[in-house]
Amino acid sequence: MPDISALYMGLNLRNPIIAASSGFTDSLSGILKCEEAGVGAVVLKSIFEEQLISHEDMYDKYINIYPESVDYLREGGLLEYGPQKIYQMIEEAKQKSKIPIIASINCRSPKLWPAFAKQFQDAGADGLELNIYSLPLELEKPCEEYEKEHLEILRSIKSAVSIPVSIKLNHQITSVPYLARRLSEAGCDGLVFFNWFVEPDIDIKNLTTRNTKGKGDFNRTLRWVALTAGRIDCDISSSGGIMDGKGLIKQILAGSSAVQVCSLFYAKGLEPVKGMLTELESWMAAHQYESIEDFKGELSFKNQELSFKNMGEAESYFRSQYLKTYEK
């Protein structure tokens, strides 16, 4: 039987499937159901700054915010999934669950990131996932400033905690390989490709704009995993559109250390996990792979470049394939 265990951010996973941050991971019962279904780890539902600052002692210490604003958020139910509940949930989950638990946080104020990262570590989280949202929309702001913000956030958190830290990237922000290299050099333990935020839409009847739930793009993720894997000194986790065992295998071949699944669970529940793992084991056995490491990144850009170095650079090989696609 092939060994399907995986190593992600220094965390030992029994398999490479991670339950992504979602409604499936926002409670102790949800975590235990994910574990029972067979996932290798869970990322808790993201907690946002607006929830974190509900503690009164945070007002003057970190940011200026009116208490009335927090009251409004609390009345609206946003603060129901609050920090104290999360800390307690992590503590209980660590007693009842054996899989790694990764906390996810989203802040806007630079001073808040390390403060709350430390609290999640103290609660027992095995790792952190930084859900950074910084849409590059300012005409006068160059990409270097967005990159600098990411690096500053990472460094502040790495100086505050000892558990592994990953960053969930936005594919639109800058050069993905360049930022990935900078972050890995700054001590990032893992990068998640990508964060799928809400998307805009227009109601042409009422002439209004609205938000719709973002959808993961499997092929976009596959491309950037393949172009980055093996070229930076940190792990990569793919996120977006992984709907079956074949998608899992493809992302690992491209270079993912683990994959995060969300949309599939919303569509079909947690039942598909076992089928995905069975398909992975069968495929590995058929190709005589004994472990995940035996084929991880085999079809990454780096490995393709090495494989075809006597036939021209890998860029030419990929361009040739591109041209062949459109000759048909």
Image (cartoon, rainbow, N blue to C red):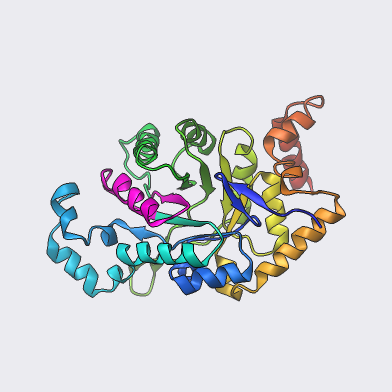
Q: Nearer the viewer, residue 120 or 300?
A: 120
Among the 4 quarters of the image, the one containing residue 136: top left
With 168 as the anchor, is 225 left or right in this view?
Answer: right
Question: For the point 37% across and 74% down, which residue is it?
Answer: 205
Spot occupied by residue 294 in the image (x, y as percentages of width and height): 76, 43
Quadrant including the N terminus: bottom right
Q: Would residue 289 be visible to someone looking at this image?
A: yes
Question: Where 103 sits versus 92, above or below?
Answer: above
Spot occupied by residue 30 in the image (x, y as percentages of width and height): 49, 72
Question: For the point 68% across and 36% down, which residue is it?
Answer: 301
With 161 as the anchor, is 291 left or right in this view?
Answer: right
Question: For the point 61% across and 32% down, which residue is it?
Answer: 231
**Residue lying furthest front in this view?**
95
With 140 as the anchor, is 258 left or right in this view?
Answer: right
Q: What is the count of numbered marks?
A: 0
With 287 as the anchor, is 161 left or right in this view?
Answer: left
Q: Would residue 82 be visible to someone looking at this image?
A: no
Q: From which residue to which does the magenta span run? A: 105-132
Question: Where 214 sits versus 304, above or below?
Answer: below
Spot occupied by residue 323 in the image (x, y as percentages of width and height): 74, 40
Spot occupied by residue 2 in the image (x, y as percentages of width and height): 79, 54
**Residue 295 is inside the magenta segment:** no
**Residue 117 is inside the magenta segment:** yes
Q: Nearer the viewer, residue 148 or 27?
A: 27
Q: Nearer the viewer, residue 137 or 153?
A: 153
